[in-house]
């Protein structure tokens, strides 16, 4: 009897240890999850840098065979990516998008839970204007709003030539998606006309990155209607993918007009409904994904006809 009791108590000891170990493991797992939930810190070094931009580098509209001269070249200021401390200029985009090295600005990537530090320096020694960065889709204090508000805003909203500012942003649960950023200083109007805008691509906490990711910014540039600052097939970005890849398009509009994004030969689901067009107004943005299954050379363009004619059209190539 007593032996059975002893035995029993000996057996009760083992489950207790097991329980304790399980509890410890659960606490460790929770702590690990909490630390990953706290997210990473992502740092970007960006400059507002004077440049000369050609809206139609090859000098022609290949569809109508119209020729253009020097009227397509404009001096401007764009957002450019640098190494730490603004030591060396980098390409804004990876090589897959050879056309958008200055317009749009660098694609800022993050994941829900991350903190994003954007170190900004104004290198505008040509026009000598103040500049700033104002971000959609993320959380921040007023000192990282980047908007000039007379009598209230600080240096974040008017970074003068030679000055710097660090914007502190947080990607929260409502930040997953594609969002614009742009100059919101006193020179906002000239800056937006000249290409000072870019995008944030934020993944959900456990969302997988797509195989291919494209950025399309609809905006007027000079007398043209442009995609990433360029007009007409042969100048606008040529995007490519392979059958079987997950493709994500990030689309936004800047300016005073609405645009209708359309890609040929493809459809995607929005709230379960198949779509092949989607309208974006000023500073609106959207993203969508599909698994590529349509080999060929296709158009993507704004479907507002006047905009198409003035350059808002590009090529998308899908290989087997
Ligand atoms: Cu349009």
Image: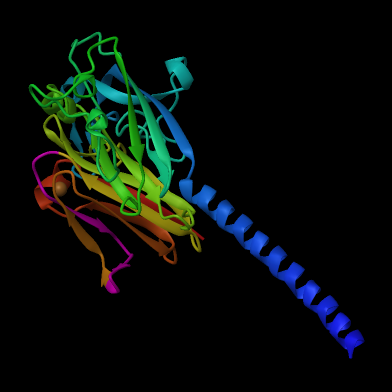
Viewer-proximal residue, 255 or 184? 184
Q: Give the percent coordinates (x, y) of residue 77.
A: 24, 20
- Can residue 201 be spotted in the picture? yes
Could you tell whether 310 is left or right of 241 in the image?
left
Q: Residue at x 44, y 31 (%)?
A: 43
- Can residue 94 be spotted in the picture? no
| Extreme residue toward the front, this view | 2
Q: Residue at x 85, y 85 (%)?
A: 5
Q: Give the percent coordinates (x, y) of residue 317.
A: 41, 53
* Quarter of the N terminus within the rendering: bottom right
Q: Is residue 76 above or below residue 288?
A: above
Q: Give the percent coordinates (x, y) of residue 103.
A: 30, 31
Viewer-proximal residue, 69 or 267? 267
Viewer-proximal residue, 10 or 258? 10
Residue numbers of the magenta segment: 255-273
Give the image quarter of residue 264. Answer: bottom left
Q: Give the percent coordinates (x, y) of residue 65.
A: 20, 39
Give the image quarter of residue 128. Answer: top left
Could you tell whether 195 is left or right of 289 in the image?
left
Q: Is residue 73 above or below residue 18?
A: above
Give the colouring mode of the picture: rainbow
Q: How many marks?
A: 0
Q: Residue at x 17, y 55 (%)?
A: 303
Could you tell whether 40 is left or right of 62 in the image?
right
| Extreme residue toward the right, this view | 3
Could you tell whether 285 is left or right of 18 in the image?
left
Q: Is residue 260 magenta?
A: yes
Q: Is residue 216 above or below residue 273?
A: above
């Amino acid at each position: 009897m007593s032996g059975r009791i002893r035995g029993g108590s000996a057996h009760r000891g083992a489950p207790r240890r097991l329980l304790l170990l399980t509890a410890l493991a659960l606490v460790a797992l929770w702590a690990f999850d909490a630390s990953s939930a706290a997210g990473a810190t992502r740092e970007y070094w960006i400059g507002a840098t004077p440049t000369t931009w050609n809206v139609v580098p090859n000098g022609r509209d290949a569809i109508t065979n119209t020729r253009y001269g020097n009227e397509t070249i404009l001096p401007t200021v764009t957002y450019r990516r640098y190494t730490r401390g603004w030591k060396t200029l980098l390409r804004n985009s990876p090589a897959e998008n050879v056309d958008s090295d200055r317009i749009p600005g660098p694609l800022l990537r993050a994941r829900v839970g991350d903190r994003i530090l954007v170190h900004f320096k104004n290198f505008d020694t040509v026009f000598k204007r103040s500049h700033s960065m104002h971000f959609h889709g993320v959380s921040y204090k007023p000192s990282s709003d980047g908007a000039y508000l007379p009598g209230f805003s600080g240096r974040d909203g008017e970074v003068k030539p030679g000055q710097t500012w660090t914007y502190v942003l947080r990607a929260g649960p409502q930040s997953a998606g594609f969002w614009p950023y742009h100059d919101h200083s006193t020179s906002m109007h000239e800056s937006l006309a000249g290409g000072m805008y870019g995008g944030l691509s934020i993944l959900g906490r456990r969302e997988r990155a797509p195989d291919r990711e494209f950025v399309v910014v609809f905006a007027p540039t000079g007398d043209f209607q442009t995609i990433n600052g360029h007009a007409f097939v042969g100048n606008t970005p040529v995007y490519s993918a392979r059958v079987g890849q997950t493709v994500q398009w990030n689309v936004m509009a800047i300016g005073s007009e609405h645009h209708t994004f359309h890609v040929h030969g493809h459809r995607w689901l929005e709230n379960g409904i198949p779509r092949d067009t989607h309208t974006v107004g000023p500073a609106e943005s959207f993203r969508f994904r599909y698994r590529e299954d349509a080999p060929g050379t296709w158009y993507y363009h704004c479907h507002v006809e006047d905009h198409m004619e003035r350059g808002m059209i590009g090529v998308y190539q899908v290989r087997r």
